[in-house]
Image (cartoon, rainbow, N blue to C red):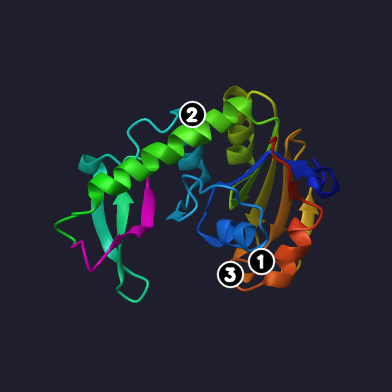
Amino acid sequence: MKLKEIKKNYSMIYSLGLNCAPSNHLRYRGLRPFAGVLDWMISPSLADVNRLLANRFVNFMELENLTFSSYYDNDSKLLIKDNYYNIYSAHDFKTDKNTPDSLSCYPEVKEKYKRRIGRFLREMETSESILFIRLGGSYDEAVELQRVLDSLVKHNYCVLLISDSNSSTMIEENWGLDHICVLNCHISKIMWDNYELWSSLLSGIGISRPQ
């Protein structure tokens, strides 16, 4: 799928990680109607995200699977790992209310993700068109992502996948996947403050939700 083919309006746009950068830039451009499940998480492996989606989030963020990884964001938050999916919660557990040994905010965090998961799964069934954005992923992982989304999304969808490389410029790749547009570049160069590049990536993309 070519980049020009994804430049259109969608009923919904979701980030699939790797980190908070896609959701930050979607929000900045008014393209994020609702918070997604992975917006504020760190998900290093697309294979694990594929497994999460294929399982429809079963066992996600269960207390028995959570462990303290490190302090985060100038020690104001705990980085908590979901060991079942190898995904990290980066913004849910602030250190003024939680400690590495006691996640006192867990019930409200779990309820928040329950709401977000419910909304996400409803959107998969009802949205006429969805765009997913993912930083990082191999060809094999992209093939599996398309297979999973084919079974999950009822109507139309596209994926914008930024694959990591040493290239300082954005190169469009042809992986021969009907629903996935692949761009190749050094991900660290676009993650946070490169608003010019994100503006170019997201230009021509809009949200048009039914009233």
- Residue that label 1 marks: 166
Tag in front: 2 or 1: 2
3D distance between C-alphas at marks 3 and 2: 29 Å
Which amino acid lies under the numbered mark 3 shown in the image of this protein?
Answer: Trp
Q: Quadrant of residue 92?
A: bottom left
Q: Would residue 152 be found to the left or right of residue 63 on screen?
A: right
Disc on the earlier residue, 2 or 1: 2
* Residues tagged 3 and 2 counted as in contact (Cβ below 8 A): no
Please state which amino acid type lies under the numbered disc 2.
Answer: Ala
Q: Residue at x 81, y 45 (%)?
A: 8
Measured as percent of width and height from the top left, residue 158 is found at 71, 38
Residue appearing at x 61%, y 74% in the figure? 193
Residue 102 is tagged as none
* C-alpha gap between disc 1 and disc 3: 17 Å
Secondary structure beneath disc 3? Answer: loop
Residue bearing mark 3:
192
Q: Amino acid at mark 1?
A: Asn
